[in-house]
Image (tube, helix red, strand yellow):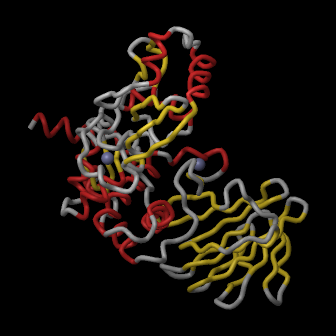
Amino acid sequence: MRTWLIILFSLGASLSLFSNNDIVRVGILHQREPIAVLFAPHTGSYEVIGDGKLLYTVKEKDAIQVTNTGGKLHLKSFNQDLGTVSKVFFKRTKWGSIFKVKPTRPNRYEHQYFDNLTITPKGTKLRLVNSVYIEHYVAGVIESEAGSSQNLEYYKVQAIICRTYALANKPRHRKEGFNVCDKVHCQVYHNRSRHNSDIQKAANGTKGIVVVDSDIDLITAAFFSNCGGQTVNSEDAWIYPLPYLKSVCDTFCTDMPHAAWVKDIPKEVWLNYLSKTYNFPVNDSLYVDCAIEHFPEMREKYFSYIDSTITTPKIRVDMKFRSAHFNLIDEGDTIKFIGNGFGHGIGLCQEGAMKMSTSGYTFSEILHYYYTSVHLIDLENIDFFRD
Ligand SMILES: [Zn+2]
Ligand SMILES: [Zn+2]
């Protein structure tokens, strides 16, 4: 009984996180804001609401041109001038409507999104915010980030990670009037999902499920391409430890496409780098021997036994290596770097997860494999507890 009370209390204390979670406001065309766009329904019709007033209903085969003219929005349909407003809201008239938006100044390719769009001026340009049902957003992100050739179970893993990230980062762009942007800074979202129906199925099939830690807080659901056989403790690559981002051995990704890499670097360039960046004593042969041949058995945080300031994640960034997990071989004038994996190595290994999903593991088993001591929680059940 006491345990149940503690659980209920913990859930209750965390509920403020979970209100109003069905809609995400996404800043689209972020940092590439146009001066003018053409808005058109792809399916359904849209109400054109200017400064709170219904001005027009735009149907398929019609369109609205929105242009920033002197800090205001000038609206025009194919055959009607709708005047100038400070804010325009394109509101779908039925569930499942899709709109197209095409920048015309400068001229760029068209994007398609589900649900609603608000446009306001941003200096001399336009700020576009797509208010989208979260599962439509999740599917759009998965297709932008993971492509359209994976299997349903893997898409479920990505859906839960994407949803967890979006809800945990809702305040990220609050000052700009939306929750998340459409770039890699948040999560890439360049279109609705349209090339593989399994993606939307995965989002709908895991509706509301998120990953939380033992305090029922949404986790930082980090992921990367391939760990090369072992993931990394968060504190070994980032500055702070997180109890669910712990190193795990991964036998699933080691024959996947990004499991290995090789890079040759001239010995002089390598030693110059160590000398300039770390004051490494390149004239001392004992030290140099350690810097040109190195075969760690496991992933290492520090490059050398004799200098604990040189970290492998920093070398990875400085030398533009695919990963911070590598051996070195002295080949005379050249150092051969033989590396494992691709990416920062913290959290979920995507290629390992892909392999697990095609080997029959469920999304839940995969998430628990890469994230330590986490729980999958359905937001709807949390609301049930609250009521
Ligand atoms: Zn962002
Ligand atoms: Zn892996």
Q: Residue at x 67, y 81 (%)?
A: 40
User: Closest to the observer: 251 or 186?
Assistant: 251
Percent across and percent down for residue 270 are: 56, 27
353 vs 106: above or below:
above
Percent across and percent down for residue 151 are: 32, 69
Q: Is residue 16 visible?
A: no
74 vs 257: above or below:
below
Q: Residue at x 46, y 20 (%)?
A: 291
Percent across and percent down for residue 54 are: 70, 77
Percent across and percent down for residue 135 are: 42, 66
- In the image, taking residue 329 as reference, residue 282 lies left or right, namely right
Q: Residue at x 36, y 49 (%)?
A: 259
Q: Residue furthest left?
A: 1
User: Closest to the observer: 25 or 333?
Assistant: 333
Q: Quadrant of residue 354?
A: bottom left
Q: Quadrant of residue 13?
A: top left
Q: Is residue 324 visible?
A: yes
Instruction: Count up the numbered dots.
Output: 0
Q: Residue at x 57, y 86 (%)?
A: 44
Q: Residue furthest right?
A: 70
User: Closest to the observer: 20 or 149?
Assistant: 149
Q: Which quadrant of the figure contains the N terminus? A: top left
